[in-house]
Image (cartoon, rainbow, N blue to C red):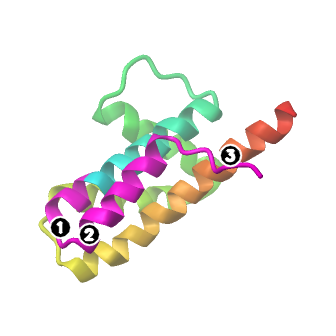
């Protein structure tokens, strides 16, 4: 039986869920943002989008490029991630925005398994 491969975005997301369940809203929000950021970086790599260094301008450009392939949802998920990182939100709103991050991670994980399937 194969175990699920966990990349950085998966680990950050799981940590965020744990923090949210304990009521640590600030730390959970930061971890959800990191999960989204790492998912964007992974999708950028998988799609061979050239990046020299990661900064805010680069990640925003990557999000735009990725939205051409995956749809406007990528833009919406990134907006949710930025809101989580910059605004002090209620637990209900964090839980709502978490779903966008979860979908983004599911896309990244699907791409990972597609890449692995091509190699086998």
Residue 5, position as x, y percentages in the image: 61, 44
Q: How many marks?
A: 3
Instruction: State the residue position of label 2.
Output: 20
Q: Earlier in the sequence, mark 1 or mark 3?
A: 1
Above or below, 112 relative to 45: below
Residue 7, position as x, y percentages in the image: 52, 41
Q: Earlier in the sequence, mark 2 or mark 3?
A: 2
> Which residues make up the magenta segment?
1-30
Residue 54, position as x, y percentages in the image: 35, 26
Residue 81, position as x, y percentages in the image: 33, 57
Residue for point 53% across, 64% down: 103
**Helix, strand or loop: magenta stretch:** helix
Crowd class of label 3 (few under 14; some 14 to 19; many from 20; radius 10 Å): some
Instruction: State the residue position of label 3.
Output: 111
Residue for point 35% across, 71% down: 97
For numbered disc 1, what is the local secondary structure?
Answer: helix
For numbered disc 2, what is the local secondary structure?
Answer: helix
Q: Are marks 2 and 1 in contact (CB under 8 Å)?
A: yes
Mark 2 to mark 3: distance in Å? Answer: 27 Å
**Which residue reaches farthest bottom?**
92
Q: Are marks 1 and 3 in contact (CB under 8 Å)?
A: no
């Amino acid at each position: 039986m194969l175990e699920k491969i966990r990349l950085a975005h998966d680990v950050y997301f799981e940590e965020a869920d744990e923090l949210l369940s304990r009521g640590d809203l600030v730390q959970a929000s930061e971890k959800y943002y990191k999960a989204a950021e790492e998912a964007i970086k992974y999708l950028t790599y998988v799609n061979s989008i050239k990046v020299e260094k990661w900064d805010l301008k680069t990640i925003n450009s990557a999000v735009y490029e990725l939205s051409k392939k995956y749809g406007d949802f990528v833009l919406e998920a990134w907006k949710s991630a930025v809101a989580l990182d910059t605004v002090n939100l209620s637990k209900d709103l964090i839980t709502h925005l978490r779903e966008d991050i979860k979908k983004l991670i599911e896309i990244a994980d699907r791409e990972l398994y597609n890449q692995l399937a091509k190699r086998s």
